[in-house]
Amino acid sequence: MTDRKKRRTLKILGATLGAGAFARAIAPLSALSETTSMEELLQQHYQELTPKDLQRVLRRLEAETKRDYGVDVTIEDVPPLEGVQFAYALNLSICIGCRKCAEACHEENNHDRGTGNSYIRVLEMDQGSMDMERGRTDYDHTVPAEGKFYMPVQCQQCENAPCVTVCPVEATWQEKDGIVVVDYNWCIGCRYCEAACPYHARRFNWNKPDVPAEEMNPNQAYLGNRVRPQGVVEKCTFCLHRTRKGRLPACLEACPTGARVFGNVLDPDSEIRWVLENKRVFVLKEELGTRPRFYYFFDE
Amino acid sequence: MQAVLLKHVVQANAFVAHVVVAVMSVLGALACTLGLVACSGHVSAEPDRAGAESPADASRSSDSPRYPVEIHMPDVLRGIRTGTVDSLQRPLLAPCGSCHASGAYALRERNDPPVQGPHAGLSFRHGELRCGACHDARRAEALHLADGRTLPLVEAMTLCGQCHGTQMRDYRHGSHGGMSGYWDLSRGPRVRNHCIDCHDPHAPAYPRYQPAPPPPDPRRRPRG
């Protein structure tokens, strides 16, 4: 609880000193009103909001999106489903590195158009190597290239997530379906989590995201793909605004090769269970003990 | 931490949304079957009738209602493209029988010289197979299995499965061939691709792509 109290002070400091604003530093209150509304500042942690307050917050965020982006969006609170634990698996024998998944993520999750941001990086790796730190993400030739294989990497939704434990204000946590979420309105932007993630899966929102009205995905979730405020950390949520309503994640549907398998591991008849039981799956950087729920495999 | 769980409050909203999404999907599928949109029709039967479980069966649990798993049916299965379109902009196809009507037509022993006539330009790179490995000698519009059983062209998947059992098994379990729609069939339907959506039966190697531009890599960003 003290962590959460501490957060308000930190947030004020952050708003004051953030983004290299000398002018703002000498006029802290105007800086605050520019980047952060008073209401936002006084908002409770997501998990402590009463249902009524939460609804008020959602409507306020919708109105702010309308004001700033000129689009009517729906921001819902989409809770985890009962009896569901998500897992994801990716077939490295099939993936050809076309980056369609990264592109779909960019669009689905209302990422900043200017930076072309995505929660997915696709690593081009030498066949026979498994060192993801040596994978290249900037390749620009026809794929698949001779002697290479391709490894898309996004949040691994770790059971034992280092990003969650380092957060000084409890702005990020794991939900009961396994998805690690961020309360973007509670995050103070210290970026400890980004540094702690061994998979480089978290992103810092440097700018106020630029998303043209006609490209905005209006189906949004509070803990998901709503437009994130500037200066906070964001991450893949397994498209919880879709998957918690039974739909497949955007990156899976976009994959033209069929390399991705997603589902509920608690369902013994699910595709994901079949893969976990019948393919020789592995996780990235297993030695760190992070216990990802994102698996990789090769066909034999 | 005294977490306040909010799900009950918003469940009502979420439920309405589910129903809307589900209805839309069903309408979408219906539009396809009626030929109203450019998705060229579906069959809902799993092509392999040899008794193995279908994708739909694979995720069936007895009680809750289940939406169907449909397999997308490519156009070309019904005939050859004539290069013209109908009033709904769908390609007009000439049925095989319109030329190959009267029973027997000679199946070649070898693939060269390449096939001519309306099929000129058909490029063939599929192992060492001959046309007759798949096409039936008596009826052009039929395929045949190794044991001589004939299949209509639309059941090509059974044919592929005969020689590519591993991929067929993986496909059935969702780990080959991709899908779209719902992971949870109690909430909405799913569409699977057909083998030949991705693999031309005559030259099945998966095509190469120019990749989409790379997103920024946080490893390359200055930290701090």
Image (cartoon, coloured by chain):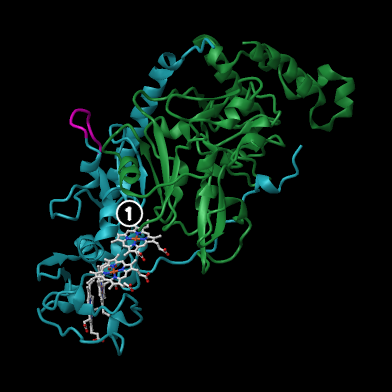
Q: Is residue B63 magenta?
A: yes
**Residue range of the region highlighted in magenta in the rendering:** B61-67
Q: Position of residue B120 (x, y in %)?
A: 32, 82
Would residue A27 appear left or right of A135 to someone viewing this image? right
| Along the viewing direction, whichever of A103 and A192 lies nearer the viewer | A192
What secondary structure characterizes most of the magenta part? Answer: loop
Q: Is residue A116 above or below residue A159?
A: below
Quadrant placement of the C terminus of chain A: bottom left
Q: Secondary structure at mark 1?
A: loop
Which quadrant holds the N terminus of chain A? top right
Tell me: B48 left or right of A48.
Answer: left
Task: Where is residue A222? Give x, y as percent.
Answer: 54, 25
Question: In this view of the protein, can residue B223 be seen by the observer?
Answer: yes
Residue B34 at least partly seen = no
Location of residue B63 in the rendering, given as x and y in whole percent from the top left corner: 19, 28
Is A56 magenta? The answer is no
Does residue A232 appear to the left or right of A223 in the view shown?
A: right
Vertical placement of residue A5 versus B189, above or below: above
Q: Image point 64% across, 21% down: which residue?
A: A186
Q: Which chain is green?
A: A
Question: Which amino acid type is shown beneath numbered disc 1?
Answer: Asn
The quadrant in which residue A3 appears is top right
